Amino acid sequence: MSVLERLIEYGESNPNVEVEEWKKTGNKVLGYWCSYIPPEIIHAAGALPYRLRGMGATGTDKADHDMSPVCNCSFPRAVLDLAHRGKYDFLDGILGMNGCDHTRRAFELWVERLQPTFSHFVYVPRTRKQVSVEKYAQELEKLKTGLEKYLGTEITGEALQQSVDLYNDNRTLLKQVQELFKKDRPPLTGTQFHHIINASVSISPVRLNLLLRELLEEVKDLDGPEDDKARLMIVGWVGDDTMLHRIIEESGGLVVMDNCCFGARAFWDPVVFDSKHPLASLGRSYLDRTGCPRMFATFNERYGMFQQAVGDYRVDGIVRTRLQFCDLHGVENVFFHKRKEQLGVPMSAPMVLDYIGQDEGRVRTRMEAFIEQLQQ
Amino acid sequence: MSDYKGFQFKTYDFSKQLDTHIDLIDLLHNTIGADLKKRPENVRWLFEPVQQYLDELAALRENPDKLVYRHFTFAPEIVYAMDCISYVPEALTFMMPTEYLCALVDEGREMDVPDHFCGFLGGVTAPLLTGRLPKPKAILHCNQPCDNSVAWGSVLAESFPDTEMFILDNPYGDDEEGVRFAAEQLREGFNYLERMTGKRLDLDRFREVMAKSAEAYRLMYEINEYKKAIPCPIPTSSILRPISVAFYALTGTEGLVGWLEKHLADTKERYEKGTGGWREEKMRVVWNLSWPIFDYGVYDWMEETFGAIAVAYHSAEPFYQPPDIDYGKASYEELLRALALRNNNHAMGRQGRGHFMTFVNDTLKWCREFSADGAIFAGHWQCQANWAAAQITKEKLMEELGIPMLIMTVDQLDPRVVSAEQMVSRLEPFLEMLAEKKGIKP
Ligand code: SF4
Ligand code: SF4
């Protein structure tokens, strides 16, 4: 199996063999909801941080008992459904936060209904005011203490520094893979890269660094096929489901960039660590990085990233998406609409998606039509 | 009017092309003014808070320097303390005629505002983004009660790119740490307002505002005590709008205290005479979350058909317990703490921002205190966090109080999503079941 195939397999499986191997060593695996819970702290405590994903869900009926399919996002419902079905029994605990209303409630309901051995909620502010940054640092301190107590260990400054370095290496390497898409004929497809991103939040950072280095070595001089694909950027899509990438690429497009949760934003900015103020600096870095829509009034930051990417990656078109019932990403469709002319590349009408149970035919028809329009 | 088994509900004509580029304050003045004139003179006083807030908005024309945008769950006391006037765009949709609101919602949709974006905010998104609402001196925003409000912050930032905003990070917990966190931020909030408006905070004025706010809450709690009596002396549904405007927009004002004093006197009198609401009370329910603002006839139908009186409205009840301090001499720190408590306990805000048990416990509290026979969760489908608390609330109510809860979907503002007729067709079997349980004939 090539390293690429291996990474894709890790990305596609929930959990993956790496997790099984990790568990065999007697170490714990902790699930976390969102990228605003720094995996560095979990890793420094000796546990494997595993980002909760909905991959593998075949329905949401178990979650729908508590969360409404009439108004709650299908991504957290898929995750919660997997938990109800015992698919997350390999986890030794879960960490939640106020990412959005849906994931926050999904965490609370998981704790209430399934009573995991360990759970911890991290309150994450939505602004970068000094008092909010301090509050977040306190929350990270509580997380540290909670983990230390549960895992019977001490998270030392050195361990934290090591984890930060490892995760920063992950980010740098992922960015290098991302850069491959600047080429005329990238050696990977967007679908493959999306699987790699999924893998990156589900295996140990040490292993990930090894695999990514090998991958880069393997593909750096390769060119992809000579097809005249429409180069697309996806904005607003959130989950680890690779369906949209796959459909786009089966319809004559190539996803060269995105600005999604399981996407470029997750590895864009490195953590700036100050060993004298470990948690404060970690917290500051997380709040300061290119924000997601949960952070107040940060659209222009993301927009700056899009604008830059349009040129750097020679984007032919932007696929606007949102998951049904996602207000945070959803409202940004409006701001894109306003900047249509300014961006200078065509953009699709908002593509409303569901996490699973997707009517693929509708998505395919829409994407084929959009790509055809670009190729004319 | 449309008919449900002989009962008349409002009808709307959505085919009319409405001019949505009109002055919204004028629109409200005219429609609400006309509506008030139709009411019997002896009940007009009930609507004073609505009038008071509209007058404040109108006064902004002469005092544009006082204009501060404020999110509806950001306690207004901070604005009054700074001698400014709060402009709450969401309040416009709350008071607007239904056809106008729907036209504005549709205008937003054409700009790609998602259909699940709360109509309170979605209805004013298009006017905001197209520069039809006045430019503020300052913007006070916060992250409770829901994602819609966070997303709304982005709409405000997009609409007024040159106006710095102050955003309060509402805490998750209800503990002292959460109060300290809010108080620290409010201190910055005052600094921000001073910087943006050029005014200085007058401590005495702040004291006075917080004293009036505390007095309003004291009066409201006293009024609520009388509501425990059977029959309930207050025709509750008819004061929903004024009560909401009062506690979402006017706390800290003399006008509100005066109105609540009248309200209390009226309640006492009705209580002493043993007078209930407009109709005979046969059972009582707690109405949870959202109500059909587009047609209060739903309550008339409940009362008339089943004698079912809604005695408490989750999102309009008081939750703030003002600290017992001497407001006349209170220090800045004490006042900030009181304001933080007020903010953290804002109706809707407190249930939406924190753990779902706050929502559950608040429902339990009102059902217990008012001896409810049942609860009705009328879930505005855009209040997503609260929706994810509905089932568990239902279970806890049954477990702890042995009373059932109906869960149904509504859209508070838009009858095209769920009409009044659809609502009553969901309510009917539930109320029949309650009636049967109580052995009463509808
Ligand atoms: S897509 Fe939006 S609503 Fe769904 S989990 Fe993500 S942020 Fe929350
Ligand atoms: S809590 Fe509900 S009614 Fe209030 S703004 Fe949010 S969605 Fe709208």
Image (cartoon, rainbow, N blue to C red):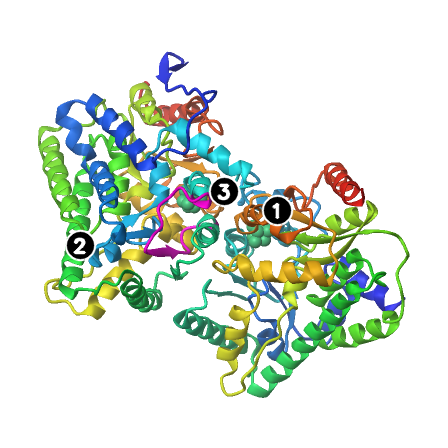
- Badge 3 element: loop
Q: Label 3 vs label 2: CA separation?
A: 34 Å
Q: Quadrant of the C terminus of chain A?
A: top right
**Residue A197: where, in percent of width, then height?**
72, 63
**Count of marks placed on residues:** 3
Mark 3 vs mark 2: which is more N-terminal?
A: 3
Read off the magenta span. Answer: B128-147
**Dominant secondary-structure state across the stretch colored magenta:** loop
**Residue B104: where, in percent of width, then height?**
45, 34
The residue at label 1 has a CB less than 8 Å from ligand 1? yes
Q: Is residue A146 visible?
A: no
Q: Which residue is mark 3?
A: B117
Drawn side of residue A366 relative to residue A117, left or right: right
Residue toward you, B159 or B351 = B159
Comparing labels 3 and 2, the label whose residue is closer to the camera: 3
Mark 2 in CB contact with mark 1 (< 8 angstroms) = no
Q: Which residue is mark 1?
A: A323
Chain of the residue where label 2 is placed in the rendered structure? B
Comparing labels 2 and 1, the label whose residue is closer to the camera: 1
Q: Amino acid at mark 3?
A: Phe
- For disc 1, the neighbor class at 10 Å (few under 14, some 14 to 19, many from 20) is many
Drawn side of residue A306 relative to residue B169, left or right: right
**Residue B159: where, in percent of width, then height?**
45, 50
